[in-house]
Amino acid sequence: MSERHDDTASEGHAASLRRIERTHAVLGGVWIAGAVLVSGPRAAFSVAAGWLVMSLSLWMWKRITTRMLFGGPTAAGRASLGMLGKMLATFGGVFALFRYLDTEAVPFVAGTLALPVACVAVVLRGHHEPLAHAV
């Protein structure tokens, strides 16, 4: 595979990821506003907390995979530690939200679903880079 093709594939994947991030942000805002109108501020906080957990998780995955792919010979070991740290931070954050901040479970899950819905929306709109082009 030529270097040019690799650059083009990387640019396409980066553009797809940016579309997913924008769609995720819009969905989060809409769902939080909807929760305020339908269920009140406590449910809106829970939706926002779920959305934020997934946003931070996506940000951490981007950093880990970038370092793993482009970080040199010791990158795989550091990426493994990064994945472990990411999982511990995510579980600890969710535990703290439910234990100390009186987060509601169903609105929280609704907030976390904004990211997978954003991914599906980008794919259905046809604005994604198929994986077959990257291989």
Image (cartoon, rainbow, N blue to C red):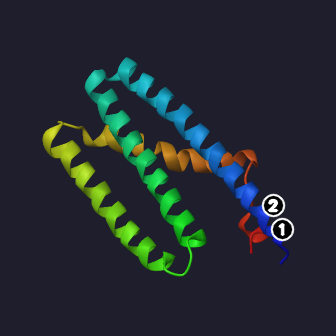
Q: Residues within 10 Å of mark 2 (few under 14, many from 20)?
A: some
Query: Is residue 17 found left or right of 107 in the rendered image?
Result: right
> What's under tag 1, amino acid-wise?
His
- Closer to the camera in the image, 92 or 116: 92
Q: Residue furthest top?
A: 37
Q: CA distance from mark 2 to mark 1?
A: 5 Å
| Residue drawn at point x = 66 percent, y = 43 percent | 19
> What's under tag 2, amino acid-wise?
Thr
The C terminus is located in which quarter? bottom right
Q: Are marks 2 and 1 in contact (CB under 8 Å)?
A: yes
The N terminus is located in which quarter? bottom right
Secondary structure beneath label 1: helix
> Percent position (x, y) of residue 2?
85, 75
Residue, disc 2:
8
> Percent position (x, y) of residue 105?
27, 43
Count the marks.
2
> Percent position (x, y) of residue 57?
42, 53
Q: Residues within 10 Å of mark 1 (few under 14, many from 20)?
A: few
> Percent position (x, y) of residue 129?
74, 58
Residue, disc 1:
5
Q: Quadrant of residue 133?
A: bottom right
| Residue drawn at point x = 36 percent, y = 21 percent | 36
Q: Residue furthest left?
A: 100
| Residue drawn at point x = 42 percent, y = 73 percent | 78
Residue 32 in view in this figure: yes
| Residue drawn at point x = 28 percent, y = 62 percent | 88
